[in-house]
Image (spheres, grey):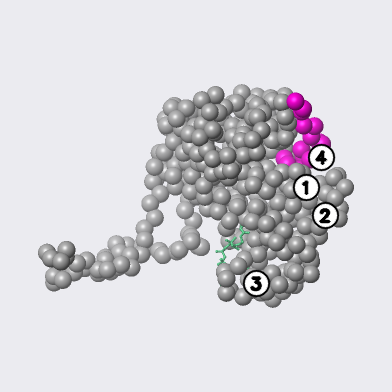
Amino acid sequence: MGPDVVDIRKLHAKSGLFTYDPGFLSTASNSSEITFIDGDKGILLYRGYPIEQLARQCDFVEICYLLMHGELPKESEKASFDKDIKHHTMLHEQLVKFYSGFRRDAHPMAVMVGVVGALSAFYHEAMDISDASHRELSAMRLIAKLPTIAAMAYKYNIGQPYIYPRNNLSYAENFLHMMFSLPTEDYKADPKIVRALDRILILHADHEQNASTSTVRLAGSSGANPFACVSAGIACLWGPAHGGANEACLHMLEEIGDVSRINEYIKRAKSKDENYRLMGFGHRVYKNFDPRAKLMRETCHEVLNVLGLQNDRLFKLALELERIALEDDYFITRKLYPNVDFYSGIVQRAMGIPTIMFTAIFAMARTVGWVAQWNEMVSDPDYKIGRPRQLYTGTPMRDVPADFRK
Ligand code: ACO
């Protein structure tokens, strides 16, 4: 090693302010006017409006408008926005053929990563992100097509013919139609079930700089195609620590199976031996009850009542698990409360939605948050490419030995 070996760690330290914050525990990556969370008080606001009021008084299309445009739409604005979305619900027939390249048993999320990314190959003007009308068009296409893409991934998985979108139905009703209708028979959705799905979509629509939204922003910060950026967001969302938790939570409840076994699983989660976690519990930002989980629990009661499933085994199990965990010192001291995914799986299961579609529905809902945040970022004339630094811990500089092959 020559005399000028430099300790690169020292070089980093000299280059000015340098923060080291693995997992971004206390680092804001950007400013945003879209969503506000107070994790200690359990407050979530979209554009300043409390999530509780939005969930009770609005529908999902109004929430999409709010997140994208900053204000709730007047009746005429909503009608025109809704018409624009409906104009884009179909998929290009070439893209429909794309599905047949996937294995039949592929997870819908894996298919969605591919199909949404492939939209980049169909809408070339989307690369012109400096044009606001092109950005708006890409955003509308994504919001409109995600239900079609998700429902087709499901139909492909179960071997049924695709059901095309129907534009005389609401956003949520159309999705249920594409999931459950057959060419021979239309699915008739109970309005209360449609309303419950709409609420699930509202509760998942945005959540400031979570992992998948940060992924979309980081990918988009290089000027990348928005369809590819949302595809990256879907890939990130699928992880069990993020959106994949709803599916994992339902598997966990099924595995626990009976109230008598709850303590065994609580014990497992507390002993760190196998890194086991209670799915649907804990949140990086909420150190109080996740307000979405409260609304989801309420929706759970409503849906189970409508369907005459008040004694649903998994719901009772979930309520009891929540009660026991919230009285346990381990969960109290770490401020681990149920998050939105704890109850969403039970609601969806009761609605007849198969477990493999839970995270796909989350992705469908979050698409508006992703595109609103992406648009906010790229329309800022001063936005910069996202480029985190690192703390290098490898070998200091050294010379390649002349005889290294020997
Ligand atoms: N079960 C048991 N213990 C837990 C859980 C859990 N679900 N979550 C966190 N802990 C413990 C950790 O082991 C750690 O304990 P320690 O202090 O003794 O080491 C402490 O609580 C803090 O946990 P972190 O992992 O540091 O918290 P972080 O903020 O990084 O993680 C996360 C948040 C990923 C959501 C975590 O709580 C988790 O894995 N939960 C289960 C998965 C889940 O439900 N994800 C959905 C999140 S919401 C969403 O994405 C829509």
Instruction: Report helix, strand or loop for mark 4.
Output: helix
**Mark 2 → mark 3, Cα distance in angstroms:** 25 Å
Circles 2 and 1 in contact, beta carbons < 8 Å: yes
User: How crowded is the residue under tag 1: few (<14 C-alpha within 10 Å), some, or many (20+)?
Assistant: some
Tell me if I can see residue 86 in this picture: yes
Asked if ligand 1 lies within 8 A of label 1, the reply is no
Q: Which quadrant of the picture is home to ligand 1? A: bottom right
In the image, what residue occupies the spot 72% across and 58% down?
A: 254
Which residue corresponds to mark 3? 268
Question: Which residue bears the numbered disc 4?
Answer: 192
Q: Earlier in the sequence, mark 2 or mark 1?
A: 2
Residue linked to disc 2: 312
Q: Residue at x 47, y 53 (%)?
A: 29
Label 3 to label 1, Cα distance in Å?
Answer: 28 Å
Q: Nearer the viewer, mark 4 or mark 3?
A: 3
Of the two numbered discs 2 and 3 on the same chain, state the one appearing first in sequence: 3
Q: Amino acid at mark 3?
A: Arg
